[in-house]
Image (cartoon, rainbow, N blue to C red):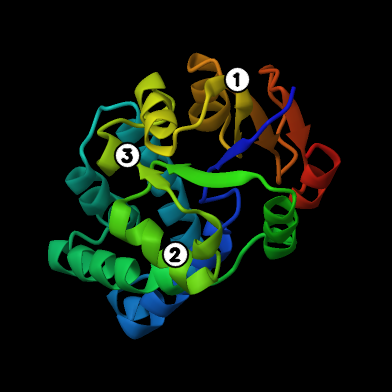
Amino acid sequence: MTYKYLFFDLDHTLWDFEANARLTLEEVYHELKLSSHGIDDFTRFYERYIYHNTRLWDRYRKGFIKRAELRKKRMWNTLLDFKIGNEKLAEEMDTFFLDKLPTRKLLFPDTLEVLEYLRGKGYAMHLITNGFESVQHTKLHYSGIKEFFPCVITSEASNSLKPHKEIFDFALQKTGASLKESIMLGDDIEADIKGAQNAGMDQVFVNHIGAVTPVKPTFTVNSLKELEHIF
């Protein structure tokens, strides 16, 4: 198969969400003096946030909750795990977190090198992301990879979410890409791999964490550098 159009996911695929979130949550923890509120273990605080954020994003992706509920509950639920029922504090934490997080710059190893390689080979590269419009553009700007992606297709702009077929159809229409010459590259089996399969698009499972899955992607890599063996 000859591909011309590479559609990347951003978070957990190129942009290291866990590392960037941890740095930002450390800042939240210290700046808002969460230890004085009864959270005396940062590691547990971080783990509980990641747990709730992952669950809420799954519900958001499936259409069970809206963006506002996602934003409100991830900090609120984390505080409740520490028996803290402070709604004002949860709102302050969320605002602080979302102000700082998109300015973080940590990418997965070899991201810039591989993107340069793919651009040099003549591929047209775009993004398909469930992330919020303004947040994703800020991440791209601060991490230095905005120039590689002329089109950024978000759930807000497309009025759909991965894994639904409609967001992939929207991406093809917006970029002028043909389905048979396009491939989706992402870390999430449900959103990226099954989503692309739903749309009839080939896929690369970017399996940074060595996850085991019964799903059979078109290709699987364990690092971004391995993409040079496919393209």
The circle drawn on residue 157 is none
Q: Horizontal placement of 178 versus 183: left or right?
A: left
Label 3 – label 1 distance at C-alpha: 23 Å
* Residue at the far left in the pictured view: 88
**Disc 2 marks which amino acid?**
Lys
Corner quadrant of residue 108:
bottom right
Q: Please report whichever mark, 3 or 1, sits nearer to the chain's N-terminal start.
A: 3
Q: Mark 3 — residue?
A: 155
Q: Picture coordinates of residue 143 (x, y %)?
A: 53, 70
Q: What's the CA distance linking mark 2 and mark 3?
A: 16 Å
- Residue 25 visible, this orientation: no
Image location of residue 130, percent across then percent down:
39, 41
Q: Residue at x 57, y 50 (%)?
A: 12
Dot 1: within a 10 Å radius of its alpha carbon, few (fewer than 14), some, or many (20 or more) residues? some
- Identified at 56% across, 35% down, the residue is 188
Q: Earlier in the sequence, mark 2 or mark 1?
A: 2
Residue that appears at 47% across and 63% down: 140
Give the structural element (helix, strand or loop) at label 1.
Answer: helix
Amino acid type indicated by mark 1: Lys
- Give the mark, 2 or 3, whose residue is nearer the N terminus: 2
Judged left or right of residue 126, residue 92 is left
Give the residue at mark 2: 139
Element marked by disc 2:
helix
Q: From the viewer's perspective, is the residue at label 3 or at label 1 nearer?
A: 1
In this figure, which residue is indicated by the disc labeled 1?
Answer: 180
Q: Nearer the viewer, mark 2 or mark 1?
A: 1
Is 159 left, or right, of 25 in this rendering? left
Residue 18 at x, y = what percent?
55, 58
Can you name the residue that lies furthest to the right here? 229
Please, what is the three-letter code of the amino acid marked with disc 3? Ser
